[in-house]
Image: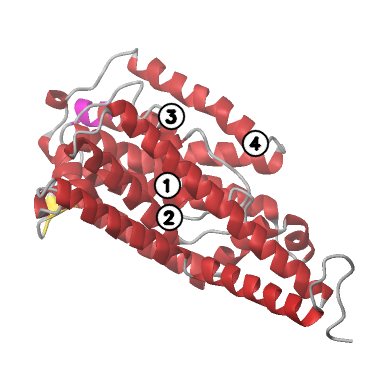
Amino acid sequence: MESRDLGSIGIPIRKRDQVEKQKRTISSYIVQFRELGLLFFILLLAAVVQLRNPSFLTWENINDMMTNTAILSVLAVGMMLVIITRGIDLSIGATLALSGMVSAMVVSYYPGIHPLLALLLGTGIGFVCGVGLGFLVARMGILPIIATLGMMNVFRGFTYLISDGKWVSAHQMPAQFKQLGTGTLFGINHLIWIAIFIYLIAYYFMSHTRTGRQIYAVGSNPEAARISGIRPDRILWLVYAIMGGLSGMAGVLWVSKFASAQGDTASGYELSVIAACVVGGVSIAGGVGKLSGVLLGAILLGIINNALPLINVSAFWQMGIQGSIILAAVLMNAIVKRGVDRNHLMRRKV
């Protein structure tokens, strides 16, 4: 009976089982080692660029590249939490601009204020913005893309309103404030140390706390999470508040690094943050995402932004290459998700 054919297909049952088992193995392998493939691609890209331009892997360029990627990687942590819960936040660029503008204006009026107080101020402003977004999404039931799109314009409008459309330039900022984003510790920029600190906290939070596991549960199946005693509305409120706080902190670091606060600061930057998450394997469908993948996704985008100008690639081609990589990552995520769903369906049948 085991060698009986399956109708007109003519595939023996035993052979079919072997093929399906092989498919499950390949899908499981891709899921488990996707980050290794991304790391291999990053190393291969770095090697190719180094062959074209020997200055790429110098310590100065690597340090600059890591510094320029630090803010992106910090924001990607918060965006990962939001996307895992099946949400999206399109307002982070506007939140960044608002907190950065307020902090820059405060330090320009009170030059003696400690930079850490300015950092806390900006983080607090972003946190309040995130709490407001969380209320709209979790309590009012507004779709995340609609709520964040609307609040993006509100926050951007507030930025222009409080600044009266003017800039805060470098000469208006005290030197100690600018040192926050440009200073170094043991030869490494402060932004890199801050990013490392954020990732360590996020790793502990996501891997070793009950709330971290609940975030994945809400993203995987909100109804099942609610039945098991989890409050999805509280989790949603929390992740948007965290995203807002990180955006606020990034705003202070941004204006400190570039020594300039403008109304259109970080306009469209949210797309780069989302791209880093998607490239890193965070599923838009929710419930799936790793910090290691997000970090590698941010590093890959940072390498692309740094490497393409070094090898004299046209700015128009740079945008096309970035888009192609993002599209390839989305397709890979779709293939992996389809394989995982197929495996789950087969196990249920068995």
Q: Answer with left or right where residue 174 lies relative to residue 79.
A: left
Residue annotated with mark 2:
294
Give the amino acid at mark 2.
Answer: Val
Residue annotated with mark 1:
276
Residue annotated with mark 4:
136
Residue shown at 60%/52% (left/top)? Answer: 334
Q: Residue furthest bottom?
A: 1
- The boundaries of the magenta stretch are 105-110
Q: Main secondary structure of the magenta part?
A: helix
Residue annotated with mark 3:
94
The quarter of the rendered structure image containing the N terminus is bottom right
Residue shown at 55%/48% (left/top)? Answer: 331
Residue shown at 64%/70% (left/top)? Answer: 23
Q: Residues within 10 Å of mark 3 (few under 14, many from 20)?
A: many
The residues tagged by marks 3 and 1 sit, at their Cα atoms, a distance apart of: 18 Å
Badges 1 and 2: C-beta atoms under 8 Å apart? yes
SS assignment at label 3: helix
Q: Nearer the viewer, residue 29 or 185?
A: 29
Give the amino acid at mark 3.
Answer: Ala
The residues tagged by marks 4 and 1 sit, at their Cα atoms, a distance apart of: 26 Å
Whichever of callouts 2 and 3 sits on the residue coming sooner in the sequence is 3
Q: Answer with left or right where residue 184 lies relative to residue 204.
A: left
The residues tagged by marks 4 and 2 sit, at their Cα atoms, a distance apart of: 27 Å
Residue 59 percent coordinates (x, y)? 10, 55
Please give the count of numbered marks on the rendered protein.
4
